[in-house]
Image (spheres, rainbow, N blue to C red):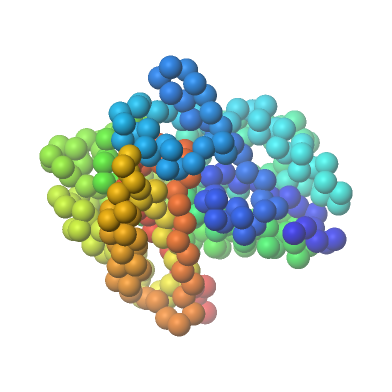
Amino acid sequence: MATAEQRVAIVTDLPSRELHTRFPDLLVTDPFINTPEGLSRHDSTLTSQLVVDELLSGIQLSTAAPGVGEIATLYEQALLNAGITDVLHVSVGTKLSTGYGNAIYIAQQEFFERAHHFDSETVFDGTGIMAGHALELARKGLGVEEILFELKAMQQRIVVFAYLDSPEFAGRGGRVEKEIITKFLARAGGKGIVEMDNNIGRSRGIAMTRKNGLARLVEAVEDVRGGRLIERVVLTSTPIGTNTGEKERRVNLSQEIDEIYDNLSGKDSNTQRENVTITPTLSVHLGPQAQGVVVLFERQK
């Protein structure tokens, strides 16, 4: 909830529904999901389960980022609120969508230095955690420069990894480098681990079974931990149902999430855990039965 001291409104992209519920004051852009027949639907009008069901039934879905007009309208909406002097857009990694980065830049020009941009250089609730933190700081009355300073420091403590059970979906979506996907697909049935930080998708290994792939996901986090303690873990998954809604499969995937968390090193009694669902748009790119881990390491003392 906005406070009397708040002068900066926060805009972001693709936070989980769970995080947006916790931070309802976040203004969220609304990308499109398109079908081969030309049907274009906003992310906000869909459920992730519906998108996964469509993917499993063979429908070729694509996505499109909001354009300049949609972004500018959101900024204008933010600046109309009483007491708000500036808007700060905490975006997903723009090199994952160069056109979107350009659209943000053009939209900013309409507001005479009242609209500002921070590139999170990542996705999932890696971006969302930063946007939520920015909102907390804004509620305390901090200005844009102060919030940006804190976000830059926080950015160094966040890592995001994805387990792709069906890498071909990421290949179609174009958000992960083609040579990485080609490498995954060159081995029949290959599963892929991708690090989604620093504005690039970086391969973190290939596995031939789901069990080994999820173990590699845990190892990838350990590879970058460097002895740091984990402050917060967000386990982010595509919906765990299927076309037939098999209960047994849902239970198994829920157990997987618990096992991923249990096997992570660097936790202590203060580590916070959240389970969230990947948004419909990201589900298009990651495919069914994907898992992600967003880790926020503790601030170094």
Q: In x, y percent, where is residue 283?
A: 41, 41
Q: Is residue 263 left or right of residue 301?
A: left
Nearest the viewer among 161 and 31 is 31
The x, y position of residue 27, in whole percent, is: 67, 46
Examine the rendered structure and indicate whether residue 96 appears above or below residue 295: above
Q: Measuring 43% from the left and 17% from the top, which residue is drawn there?
A: 37
Between 89 and 283, which is closer to the camera in this rendering? 283
Q: How many marks?
A: 0
Q: Is residue 57 above or below residue 148?
A: above
Quadrant of residue 102 within the rendered picture:
top right
Spot the residue most to the bottom: 269
Residue 148, image quadrant: bottom right
Q: Can I make out residue 198 in this image?
A: no
Q: Can residue 230 be seen in this snapshot?
A: yes
Tell whether 213 sits left or right of 281: left
Residue drawn at the location 39% of the way across and 48% of the way down: 239
Q: Can you tell which quarter of the image residue 89 is in?
A: top right
Q: Which residue is pictured at 77% across the width and 36% down the height? A: 76
Q: Position of residue 264 (x, y in %)?
A: 33, 70
Residue shown at 40%/28% (left/top)? 61
Query: Which residue sits furthest top?
Result: 37
The N terminus sits in image quarter: bottom right
Judged left or right of residue 81, residue 1 is left
Residue 165 in the figure: left or right of residue 22: left
Residue 208 in percent (x, y) is at: 14, 50
